[in-house]
Image (cartoon, rainbow, N blue to C red):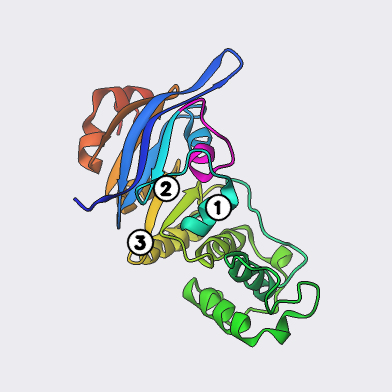
Amino acid sequence: MSESLLVIDGVSRHFGGVTALAEVSFSVAAGEVHALIGPNGAGKTTLIHQISGAQRPDAGRIVFSGEDLTALPMHTRVQRGMARSWQITNVFNRLTLLDNVVLAVKGRQRDWGSGFRFWQPVDDEQALIDEARGWLAEVGLGGRERTLAGSLAHGEQRQLEVVLALATKPKLLLLDEPMAGTGPEESERMVALIGKLARHVTILLVEHDMDAVFRLADRISVLVGGRLVCTGLPDEVRAHPEVRRAYLGEAA
């Protein structure tokens, strides 16, 4: 297996008297699609918050590319090469697709004062425009640069959100339920997109669509009640008795 890009080491998180995560440990290898599954309330999104920097764990470490990021804020993790999408679509609805992506491209740059006039038209920045067009084409939204993001169908907004994450040029892409709220055709397009992206970037995928998970994942980790039940190959996870009881059901 490839060298670990991400190591979750004994991560715990409590909210008052409730234990959301209990000493969770697993690793994500460089180049793999690693799925994180579990029933509602298992702690999946809480763990993604710890990894991305939206929250800080009460105990344990988040190690990325050999560096302990546990105490670092979200924007620093983005600069290190980590990007995420959210359960709820998070795009600028009143901006065009092109403007959304241009801002994401600029967001990965450290010096906001060099050569970018934030409130002036983005057309003044041709290099940013060209790169943004390329990202839109990558996910099948090419030719729609001037469309307002708020006018997109839900599945297309999900695609745009993935573009915004990709525009930061991450080493690791955290996808938090990218198929949520999508219909069968939209879900199929997202599965195809994730499969395409997996050739270029390591992906940690949180998803309830088990068909998509077992089609995409190289390895799977299972959370139940904030505790890691197992990590393994899809067939190993599918056959695990506690996974079958807690999540997939005996019919799986």
Which residue occupies 44% across, 24% down?
226
In the rendered image, the residue lying farthest to the right is 119
Residue kind at label 2, given as amino acid type: Leu
Query: Are the two marked residues, 3 and 1, in contact with CB atoms closer than 8 angstroms?
Result: no
Q: Residue at x 55, y 63 (%)?
A: 159
Q: Is residue 140 above or below residue 159?
A: below
User: Which is more N-terminal, label 1 or label 3?
Assistant: 1
Toward the top, the furthest residue is 17
Point 45% across, 55% down: residue: 173
Taking the image as shown, residue 228 lies to the left or right of residue 173, namely left
Is residue 193 left or right of 160 when viewed as pictured?
Answer: left
Q: Is residue 183 visible?
A: no
**Which residue carries the number 1 mark?**
76
At label 2, counting other C-alpha atoms closer than 10 Å, the crowd grade (few under 14, some 14-19, many 20 or more) is many
Residue 123 higher or lower than 197, as above or below: below
What range of the chain is rendered magenta?
48-59
3D distance between C-alphas at marks 3 and 2: 11 Å
Residue 224 seen = yes
Residue 206 screen position, x and y as percent: 45, 43
Q: Which residue is mark 3?
A: 198
Q: Secondary structure at mark 2?
A: strand
Position of the C terminus by quadrant? top left
Query: Which amino acid is tagged 3?
Result: Ala
Q: Which mark is residue 205?
A: 2
Q: Position of residue 194 (x, y in %)?
A: 41, 60
Q: Residue at x 53, y 68 (%)?
A: 167
Q: Is residue 54 magenta?
A: yes
Local secondary structure at mark 3? loop
- Residue 30 vs 111, above or below: the answer is above
